[in-house]
């Protein structure tokens, strides 16, 4: 949406994600991340931690369930979402302002760790790849192994010659970025 502040934050989970469900059944996971800048002090020849940024985050629906199942306290994560400001008044009459992140994407940081990704079955409509027209939020549609783009290998380049560098369109549904031997060494633009 126009005018929203989209940010990416790298930090560590302060606590385990807390999974809840709305009365209508929508899942929401709440968690906090801490992002602490580090600078090298040349005078002392040591790394120095700066002021930590703590952000409350919320992610919805299937992604919320995935977060609750996959992430835990202490993990380093990369989070992208819309920064929101909310003002409220405490019971004592003090006015407060908090900043929160409505998360769109989240994943483990692979800078100091490894991860094994397991694809989940889609649970209904929304954007992105849909499992064969299941847009109404009904029962998830099981996909056969041949239809799943994550399970099929890249197209074979057997019997296909190298294309020229004249900027022509790929032939026969070739993927010029993924199929070995397709096109030239130059990008198709």
Image (spheres, rainbow, N blue to C red):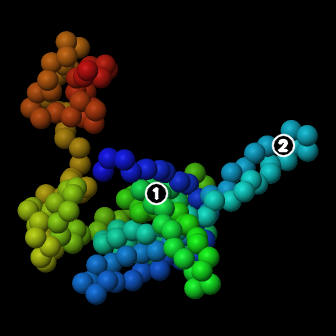
Q: Is residue 55 left or right of residue 163?
A: right
Q: Secondary structure at mark 1?
A: strand
Tell me where residue 142 sits by quadrant: bottom left
Measuring from the top left, give residue 93's x and y in whole percent.
60, 80
Tell me where residue 135 sits by quadrant: bottom left
Along the polypeptide, which appears first: circle 1 or circle 2? 2
Tell me where residue 29 sits by quadrant: bottom left
Q: Residue at x 26, y 83 (%)?
A: 25
Q: Is residue 110 left or right of residue 38?
A: left
Q: Residue at x 34, y 83 (%)?
A: 21
Q: How far apart in space, not on screen, are marks 1 and 2 (Cα)?
A: 31 Å
**Who is closer to the viewer here, 117 or 157?**
117
Q: Point out the frontmost of discs 1 and 2.
A: 1
Q: Residue 88, can we see it?
A: yes
Q: Secondary structure at mark 2?
A: strand
Disc 2: which residue: 41
Disc 1: which residue: 83
**Who is closer to the viewer here, 187 or 136?**
136
Measuring from the top left, give residue 10's x and y in whole percent.
56, 54
Measuring from the top left, give residue 55's x and y in whole percent.
56, 64
Few, some or many residues within 10 Å of mark 2 (<14, 14–19, 20+) = few
**Who is closer to the viewer here, 86 or 175?**
86
In the current view of this chain or complex, which residue is farthest to the right? 44
Q: Please, is residue 118 above or below residue 45 in the view?
A: below
Q: Please, is residue 17 above or below residue 86 in the view?
A: below
């Amino acid at each position: 949406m126009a005018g929203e502040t989209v940010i990416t934050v790298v930090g560590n989970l302060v606590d385990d994600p807390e999974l809840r469900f709305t009365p209508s059944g929508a899942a929401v996971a709440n968690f906090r991340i801490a992002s602490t800048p580090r600078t090298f002090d040349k005078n002392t020849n040591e790394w120095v931690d700066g002021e930590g940024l703590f952000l409350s985050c919320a992610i919805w629906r299937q992604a919320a369930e995935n977060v609750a199942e996959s992430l835990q306290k202490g993990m380093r994560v990369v989070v992208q979402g819309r920064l929101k400001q909310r003002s409220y008044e405490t019971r004592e009459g003090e006015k407060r302002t908090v900043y929160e992140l409505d998360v769109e994407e989240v994943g483990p940081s692979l800078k100091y760790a490894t991860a094994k990704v397991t694809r989940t079955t889609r649970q209904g409509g929304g954007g992105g790849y849909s499992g064969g027209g299941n847009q109404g939020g009904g029962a998830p549609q099981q996909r056969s192994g041949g239809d799943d783009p994550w399970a099929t290998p890249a197209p074979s380049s057997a019997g296909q010659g190298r294309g020229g560098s004249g900027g022509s369109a790929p032939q026969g549904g070739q993927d010029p970025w993924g199929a070995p031997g397709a096109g030239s060494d130059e990008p198709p633009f």
